[in-house]
Structure formats: structure tokens, C-alpha cells
Image (spheres, rainbow, N blue to C red):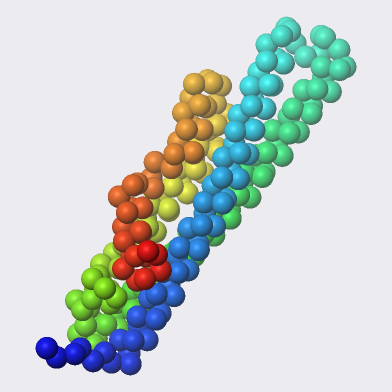
Amino acid sequence: MALLVESPKHQLTCRRVKDSLAKLYNTIQTWNSLSSSSFDALNKLANVIIEEECLLATGTSISSVGETRIRLHGKIIEKREELYVQLQQLLTAMGSVVSRIGDILIGMRASVELLVNLDEQDTPLFNTLPITSISEGVEDVYQCYSEEHYLRRRILNDIYKEKDRDTRTVYLSCWLHEPCISEDMKMKLSSLLTDSGLKD
């Protein structure tokens, strides 16, 4: 049985792809941390909105019941605005995460191009997956996180104005469960990390 001798370009590409997959993993961990923080902030925002509704529902008008209630309502509005700004900042950071995943994808496409030129695009890069499969997997990751980021921007815009509690609860649930980030995509990511030796 003949040993496969890998070219220096192939070895360099393997190293670059492995580094890119490590960056992808770390980038997704950053997303997860931001996602947790943003859910906490969104939950607080929903509770502040409920608090404001309860305050407004207890009387006919804010101005008719005194200065204390007006001050309380002002504090609620201030807290709501503060949480909204905090969520916008977290979503901006999450957008940066999606951009980093996009940059990783661009690097992966360059690696595919190099191996296509070497006529090695179907050769397994690590254990079993060829570079084309790895690149497609990263593209799937990028697509899912990009869609999830878009959904969260819509949710933040809508929950801020939404009057129905049940609808706000659905928004919170969507934020928590990340419907655009499928289990299938998580399995693909896991197999990419396992195949490259980054995960057992």
C-alpha cells in the first residue's frame, strides 16, 4: 500500500482550515455568550413593558393620580429605553460575530480554490471530509447565524411595540430557542470539529 505524500501547499491548507475551524468554534462561543446576555436583557424589557402596562391600567390617566405615579412612569420609560439600547448594542456585537463567520467562510473558499487548482478538492483534508464538504458546512453555519441575527433584529423591533403579552412570550421563546440555528446545523458543525481533530 502506497503512502499518500501530501504537498506542502496541501499541508498548509490543512493548517489554515484547522485554524479557521478553531476560530469558527470560538466565534460561536462568543455568539452563545451574547445570546445569553441578550435573552436576559430581552426578558427584563418584556417585564418592564408589563410593569408599565400594569401602572397604566390602575388608573384613568397618569396625570390625574399625582406626581409619584408620574415619576414612577418616567423611571419605567427610562428603564425601557435603557434596555432597548443595551439590546441594540448586543445585537450589533452579534452582527460582528456573523461578519467574522463570513470572513472565515471567505478564507475557506480561498482554501477550496487552492485545492481545486492542485486537483485535490475531493481528497479528505483531515479524516473523512474533503475541503468542499468543510466549506459547505461553514457556509451552512454562516447562513443559519445570519438568518438568526436578522430574526432577532425583527423581534427586538416588534417586541418593543407589541401590546399582546402572548405574542411577546412567543418572541421571548423564539429568542431563547434560536429557530434558525437547527439541530442539523449543530451536528454539521460538530462533525467538522470532530473530523479536524478539534473535538473528541
Give coordinates of residue 34: x percent, y percent: 57, 50
For the point 43% across and 47% down, the residue is 148
> Is residue 95 something one can see in this rendering?
no
State left or right for residue 139 relative to residue 84. Answer: left
- Residue ranking furthest to the left: 1
State left or right for residue 191 relative to residue 177. Answer: left
Give coordinates of residue 78: x percent, y percent: 76, 33
For the point 29% across and 80% down, the residue is 113
For the point 54% across and 57% down, the residue is 30
- Work out whether residue 82 or residue 23 is closer to the camera in this orientation and state it: 23
- Residue ranking furthest to the top: 60
State left or right for residue 100 relative to residue 137. Answer: right
> Is residue 161 something one can see in this rendering?
yes
State left or right for residue 36 relative to residue 65. Answer: left
| Res 15 quadrant in image | bottom left
Please tell me how many numbered marks the rendered image carries.
Answer: 0
For the point 29% across and 75% down, the residue is 126
Q: Is residue 138 above or below residue 19?
A: above
Q: Which quarter shows the N terminus?
A: bottom left
- Residue ranking furthest to the right: 67
Give coordinates of residue 72: x percent, y percent: 80, 22
Q: Is residue 166 above or below residue 160?
A: above
Q: Which quarter shows the C terminus?
A: bottom left
- Work out whether residue 14 or residue 80 is closer to the camera in this orientation and state it: 14
Give coordinates of residue 175: x percent, y percent: 49, 39
Q: Is residue 10 above or below residue 108?
A: below
